[in-house]
Amino acid sequence: MRGFTLVETMVAVLIAGVLATIAVPQLQGIVKAQSEGYEIEQIQDFIKIAQRNAIRRSQGCQVDFVVSGQKVSGLGSNCDGVTQQLRIEQDINYVGSQVIDFNFRGYVVSSAGALSRDFETLFFSKSYCVVVGTNIGLIRKGVYSGFCKI
């Protein structure tokens, strides 16, 4: 005789169902974690591109934040007359100057700033942050428990 009995098939389907029940919430958590930090990555890349353009063109470059209240709704850069824009869909908080000026070496000549997207759950709060430091133009990104600081 060849093949599987009905009982064997039902046991295999039951095991597959239990494994799927365990795996699906884990996969949803991974997808959610990646989507939470996606816009912060876009913002960091946008600022880094403006910094690289300042260095490449040996001219100053400026990143402007479109701010309404304490929330950022977009970014714009102006490098030697070439403008770029980034529209932000999520609530992004911003602390600091509304303009980041890079000189021809890519150093920040304006005040420092920090952008964050805050998440609060019943048990903890965390922030995805991009911090732009003064002087050498250090741009760093991270996940912090609590809130971002410049």
Image: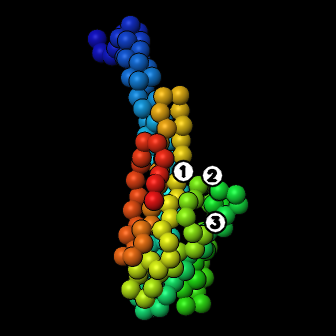
Label at residue 74: 3
The residue drawn where x is 62% and y is 52% is 91
Inspect the image, locate mark 2, and give the three-letter code of the amino acid beneath it: Asp
| Dot 1 alpha-carbon crowd within 10 angstroms: few under 14, some 14 to 19, many 20 or more | many
Lower sequence index among marks 2 and 3: 3
**Helix, strand or loop for disc 3:** strand
The residue drawn where x is 42% and y is 72% is 134
When asked about the image quadrant of residue 17, the answer is: top left
Contact between marks 3 and 1 (CB within 8 A): the answer is no
Inspect the image, locate mark 3, and give the three-letter code of the amino acid beneath it: Gly
Question: Considering depth in this image, is 46 or 127 the residue closer to the camera?
Answer: 127
Reading the image, the residue beneath label 1 is: 117
Horizontal and vertical percent position of residue 21:
45, 22
Quadrant of the frame with the C terminus:
bottom left
Label at residue 91: 2
Horizontal and vertical percent position of residue 25:
46, 29
Between marks 3 and 1, how big is the CA–CA gap? 14 Å
Question: Considering depth in this image, is 37 or 70 the residue closer to the camera?
Answer: 70
Instruction: Report the side of 6 relative to 121 (left or right).
Output: left
Contact between marks 1 and 2 (CB within 8 A): the answer is yes
Instruction: Report the side of 76 relative to 129 (left or right).
Output: right
Residue 45 in sight in this render: no
| Dot 3 alpha-carbon crowd within 10 angstroms: few under 14, some 14 to 19, many 20 or more | some
